[in-house]
Amino acid sequence: MKSFIAKVYITLRSGILDVQGKAIEHALHSLDFEMINNVRIGKYITLNIEAQNDGQAKVFVENACKELLSNPIIEDFNIEIIEND
Amino acid sequence: MKSFIAKVYITLRSGILDVQGKAIEHALHSLDFEMINNVRIGKYITLNIEAQNDGQAKVFVENACKELLSNPIIEDFNIEIIEND
């Protein structure tokens, strides 16, 4: 068994209105950050995982995303696996 | 003026208890993902920004992080700037 770090990026699918992002965008504009637009808020999850190899680690994390971490109807996820020395 | 995309990663500082991460870790264990540990939940923000160059874009986004996007007492942030073709 090896130890890996997984970085998971969960984003709202394009086409899904990001209400929280819009609110933050308005707040930024009122603070004179008018040069900033199209703010979208996602989740950045890091975790440690034990697996035989990086391929197996990725499959475990994909399953965790599908079953719990993301809402596949409105969200996409991306996974990076890094060996933990 | 050029257009850039910024990716902002906001994480709880190490040493700060991640209550949401702990809750998700327990839920994962009860779903038979015992190989996953040390779950930490951060934010992944993407935005578009107009600036003269990537250095100026980064300064704008750093200021937005300090003033609104992050809580500097308990959170760290990392910024990636990508030219938007």
Image (cartoon, coloured by chain):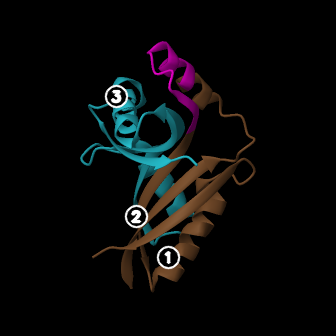
Chain colours: A brown, B cyan
Residue B50 located left or right of residue B17:
right
What residue is disc 2 on? B37
Q: Chain of mark 2?
A: B
User: SS at mark 3?
Assistant: helix
Q: Please, what secondary structure does the residue beneath circle 1 have? A: helix
Q: Bounds of the magenta span?
A: A25-40
Amino acid type, callout 3: Asn
Picture coordinates of residue B31 (x, y %)?
58, 64
Q: Give the CA distance from mark 2 to mark 3.
A: 33 Å
Q: Is residue A38 magenta?
A: yes
* Residue A73 forms part of the magenta stretch: no
Reading the chain from its start, which is encountered first: label 2 or label 3? 2
- Tag in front: 1 or 3: 3
Q: Which residue shows up at 24% across the image and 46% down it? A: B15
Q: Is residue A70 above or below residue B16?
A: below
Whether residues under marks 2 and 3 lie with C-beta atoms below 8 angstroms apart, the answer is no
Q: Quick one: A2 or B55, which is closer to the camera?
A: B55
Q: Toward which corner of the image does residue B13 lie, by quadrant?
A: top left
Residue A57 is tagged as: 1
Q: Is residue A14 above or below residue A39?
A: below
| Residue type, numbered disc 1 | Ala
Viewer-closest of B14 and B5: B5
Q: Mark 1 vs mark 2: give the one in front.
A: 1
Q: Residues within 10 Å of mark 2 (few under 14, many from 20)?
A: many
Residue under circle 3?
B63
Secondary structure beneath dot 2 equals: strand
Q: Is residue B8 above or below residue B33?
A: above
Residue at figure coordinates x 37%, y 38% from the top left: B58
Residues behind callouts 1 and 3 on a single chain: no
